[in-house]
C-alpha cells in the first residue's frame, strides 16, 4: 500500500518532478544612467526572493546595512560589483558557427549562469552564519568564472565550438594551470590580473577547501558553535574581493563593456544579441571600479581590434526616430506596444531569461537501479568497483 506524503514541501516537490524548469530575471532600466544613485538591492542582484530569506539572514543583513550607514562605503561598493556582475551577461554574443547541436550557441555561457547560483548560495550562507560554507563556495565561483572565460576565448580562437562541445561530451576540462593561463589575454596588462586570480585560488584552497589552522575557525570569534559573530558578519568583504577579481577577467575579455551605446536608438527592438551593451550597463561597470582602474581598463579596451571595428559599425548605423523604433516592436509575440522605454526593458528581460534558460542542458533525470544502490552501501560492492577499476587501468596500460 502506498503511503501518501504528509509534508507540504514533499507534496510540492513530488508534484514538480515532471514540470518544466522555471527561470526568473530582473532588468532595472534607468532613463538617465549617469544619474544612478544606488546599485541593485543585494537580494535582487542575487535573484533571491525576500520570502526565501530566513530571520537569521534578515537580522544579519539589517546589521550590515546599519554599519554601512555609519560610513562603511565598501558595502555600497560590493553592491555595485554585484550589479555589474548581473549586467555582464548583456555582452554575451551568439556567434553562428557550425556545431553538432546549435543549442551550444547558448550553452557556451553555462559557466556564468552556474556561477551566479554559487555566488548567491555563498552570500546566503554568510548571512545565515555559515561562514565555512560561504568561503568554500567562493573557489568554485571563481573556477566557473575562469572556465567561462577560457572556453569563450578557446572557441573564438578555434573558430568552432568544438572545445566546449568536447567538455559537454566528456565532462573534462584542461588542468587549472592551462585554464588560468588562457582565461585572460597573454599580454603585460593582464599579467597582474592573472597573478591575482592565481593568488585567490591558492588562498581559497588553503583557507576553506582543505584542513586549516584553528586560527581560521569561525569558532574563534563567536560564543556559541553556530550563529553569527561580530567578525563574521563582515564575510562579504572576502566575497567582494573575489567578485572583483572575477569582474576583471570579464572586463579584459569583453572590452566593449567599456563602450556603451544607445542600443534602442540605433536598432530599436531588433538589436544584436550581445556584442554591445547599453548605457545602464556601462554605468554599472564604471561604478564597480575605482576611477584609476576604470581609466586603465578603458584605455586597454581601446587597443583591442574588436572595439574599433564594432564601434565603427555602430557609428555607421543611422539614429532611428521614435516612430521607427516603435515599428520594430513585434505585437504578435510581445503584445501591445507599451512605450519606448518600457518596451526596451521588456525586451532586455526577455533576452536575459532566454539566455539563462538555454544555457542549461535538457534534464536527464534517471532513477538509479536498486542493485547499484545496494552495491554503494556494501563492502562487497566496493570490492567489485575496485577490481573493475584496476582491470580498466591494466587494460589501458596494455593498449
Image (tube, grey):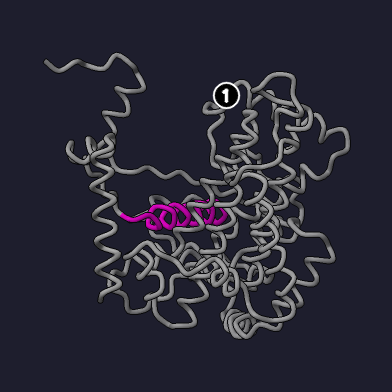
> In the drawing, does residue 110 fall left or right of residue 129?
left
Residue 323 visible in the picture: no
Q: Residue at x 72, y 52 (%)?
A: 241
In the depicted structure, whether residue 210 falls above or below residue 101 = above
Q: How many marks?
A: 1
Q: Residue 299, percent across and down? A: 76, 77
Relative height, residue 377 to residue 208 (above, below): above
On the rendered image, what quadrant is the C terminus found in? bottom left
Picture quadrant where residue 145 is located: bottom right
Residue carrying label 1: 54
Question: At numbered mark 1, what does the secondary structure look like: helix, strand or loop?
Answer: loop
Majority secondary structure of magenta residues: helix
Residue at 51%, 68% (x, y): give it. 175
Q: Residue 295: percent from the left, percent from the top?
A: 80, 70
Q: Is residue 380 left or right of residue 283?
A: left
Magenta stretch holds residue 355: yes
Asked if the magenta segment contains residue 393, the reply would be no
Q: Is residue 194 above or below residue 210?
A: below
The part of the chain drawn in magenta is 339-361
Can the viewer see residue 334 in this picture?
yes
Amino acid at each position: 500500500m502506498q503511503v501518501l506524503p504528509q509534508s507540504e514541501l514533499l507534496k510540492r516537490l513530488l508534484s514538480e518532478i515532471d514540470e518544466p524548469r522555471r527561470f526568473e530575471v530582473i532588468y532595472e532600466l534607468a532613463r538617465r544612467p549617469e544619474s544612478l544613485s544606488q546599485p541593485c538591492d543585494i537580494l535582487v542582484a542575487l535573484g533571491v526572493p525576500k520570502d526565501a530569506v530566513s530571520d537569521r539572514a534578515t537580522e544579519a543583513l539589517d546589521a550590515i546595512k546599519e554599519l554601512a550607514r555609519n560610513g562603511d562605503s565598501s558595502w555600497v561598493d560590493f553592491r555595485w560589483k554585484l550589479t555589474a556582475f548581473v549586467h555582464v551577461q548583456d555582452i554575451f554574443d551568439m556567434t553562428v558557427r557550425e556545431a553538432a547541436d546549435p543549442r551550444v550557441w547558448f550553452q557556451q555561457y553555462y559557466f556564468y549562469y552556474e556561477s551566479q547560483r554559487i555566488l548567491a548560495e555563498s552570500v546566503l550562507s554568510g548571512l545565515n552564519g555559515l561562514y565555512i560554507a560561504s568561503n568554500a563556495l567562493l573557489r568554485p565561483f571563481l573556477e566557473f568564472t575562469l572556465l567561462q572565460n577560457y572556453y569563450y576565448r578557446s572557441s573564438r580562437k578555434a573558430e568552432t565550438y568544438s572545445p566546449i562541445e568536447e567538455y559537454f561530451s566528456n565532462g573534462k576540462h584542461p588542468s587549472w594551470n592551462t585554464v588560468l593561463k588562457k582565461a585572460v589575454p597573454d599580454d603585460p596588462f593582464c599579467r597582474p590580473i592573472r597573478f591575482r586570480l592565481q593568488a585567490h585560488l591558492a588562498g581559497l584552497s588553503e583557507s576553506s577547501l582543505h584542513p586549516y589552522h584553528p586560527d581560521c575557525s569561525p569558532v574563534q570569534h563567536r560564543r556559541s558553535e553556530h550563529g553569527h559573530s561580530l567578525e563574521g558578519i563582515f564575510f562579504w568583504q572576502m566575497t567582494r574581493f573575489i567578485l572583483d577579481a572575477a569582474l576583471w577577467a570579464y572586463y579584459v575579455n569583453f572590452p566593449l563593456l567599456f563602450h556603451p551605446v544607445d542600443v534602442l536608438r540605433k536598432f530599436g527592438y531588433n538589436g544584436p544579441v550581445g556584442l554591445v551593451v547599453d548605457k545602464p550597463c556601462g554605468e554599472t561597470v564604471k561604478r564597480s571600479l575605482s576611477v584609476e582602474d576604470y581609466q586603465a581598463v578603458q584605455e586597454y579596451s581601446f587597443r583591442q581590434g574588436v572595439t574599433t571595428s564594432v564601434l565603427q559599425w555602430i557609428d555607421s548605423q543611422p539614429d532611428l526616430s521614435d516612430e521607427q523604433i516603435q515599428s520594430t516592436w513585434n505585437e504578435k509575440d510581445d503584445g501591445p506596444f507599451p512605450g519606448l522605454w518600457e518596451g526596451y526593458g521588456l525586451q532586455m528581460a526577455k533576452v536575459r531569461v532566454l539566455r539563462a534558460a538555454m544555457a542549461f542542458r535538457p534534464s536527464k533525470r534517471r532513477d538509479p537501479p536498486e542493485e547499484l544502490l545496494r552495491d554503494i552501501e556494501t563492502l562487497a560492492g566496493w570490492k567489485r568497483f575496485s577490481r573493475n577499476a584496476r582491470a580498466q587501468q591494466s587494460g589501458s596500460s596494455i593498449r
